Image (cartoon, coloured by chain):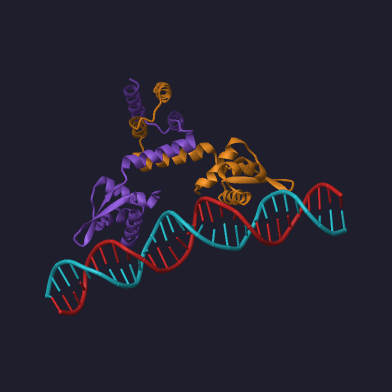
Chain colours: A purple, B orange, C cyan, D red
Amino acid sequence: MKISSAESVIMEALWRKQPLTSEAIIAEVGEPNGWTEGTVKQLISRLLKKKAIAAQPDGRRYLYSPLLARRDYVQAESQGLLDRLFDGRLAPLVTQFSEGGKLSDEDVAELKALVERISR
Amino acid sequence: MKISSAESVIMEALWRKQPLTSEAIIAEVGEPNGWTEGTVKQLISRLLKKKAIAAQPDGRRYLYSPLLARRDYVQAESQGLLDRLFDGRLAPLVTQFSEGGKLSDEDVAELKALVERISR
DNA sequence: CGCCATCGTTGACAAGCGTCATCGATCGGG
DNA sequence: CCCGATCGATGACGCTTGTCAACGATGGCG
């Protein structure tokens, strides 16, 4: 099931720290996004329905934890973009950023070190 | 204005070859996506409303051309993903693919050459 | 000159999303 | 033991998206 953009904000909160009560999630993401309590609760409900998170009873409330691993989510999203826009190849993506002048010297250094490490 | 996923299929066709008549677009994307004529026409209309493409009269029909450059679209999409998932940094994205075993030897070689070229 | 084929425009509808409020159950304090 | 606070569930609503069909204008062929 697909995670929507607003829902992914909740996921990110849970990936940062888990488990969390709804109250804690609201505290975490409500303010920064200008969301009311109702909005966040609805997002939590939808994530439950999508089985992207789990709720374990804790007294009268629930503690929520991600079921979907961030690694898997990120992998799928990245692969999707790569496939859609770059024919599944990574190098053209890097070229894109390079040509757009979007690479800092630090980025380049990091990449260089990374490629060195990988290629051996 | 945001281009939806179905709409982007039309854009890709126009980026490949431009300008195109609606008939040509339908021929190009209809079949492979299982879309009827009506569906493609609706997508074209929405892209026009979003000013992502332009229509120039040609007799009784129109010739459609992209107004949005693929370069810009791809740049925005990529940057968005990078910002959302990788804190705006490119190296972690590459790491992600590397760790996922998603890099072929060829990918690595390409990357290496690319980074060499950039870093000088 | 009239009919048919063909355009583009528009209407339609279900599903998903973003956003928020209300409701029914229930726990704890007085 | 009852009332209020709080929790999760649910209803609601407007907008976008995916999908398709119907309509109205118009150009060309017979």
Residue B33 appears anywhere in the view: yes
Q: Position of residue D17 (x, y in %)?
A: 50, 51
Residue B120 appears anywhere in the view: no
Q: Residue at x 46, y 30 (%)?
A: A92
Q: Residue at x 21, y 62 (%)?
A: A60
Q: Position of residue D24 (x, y in %)?
A: 71, 61
Q: Position of residue A44 (x, y in %)?
A: 32, 56
Vertically, is B43 above or below B19? below
Q: Is residue B80 left or right of residue B29?
A: left
Q: Is residue B66 left or right of residue B91?
A: right
Q: Where does the C terminus of chain B fall, quadrant-wise?
A: top left
Which one is in front, B45 or A109? B45
Which one is in front, B28 or D15? B28
Vertically, is A9 above or below A36? above
Q: Could you tell me how many numbered marks the image carries?
A: 0
Q: Residue at x 43, y 23 (%)?
A: B106
Vertically, is D21 above or below B29? below
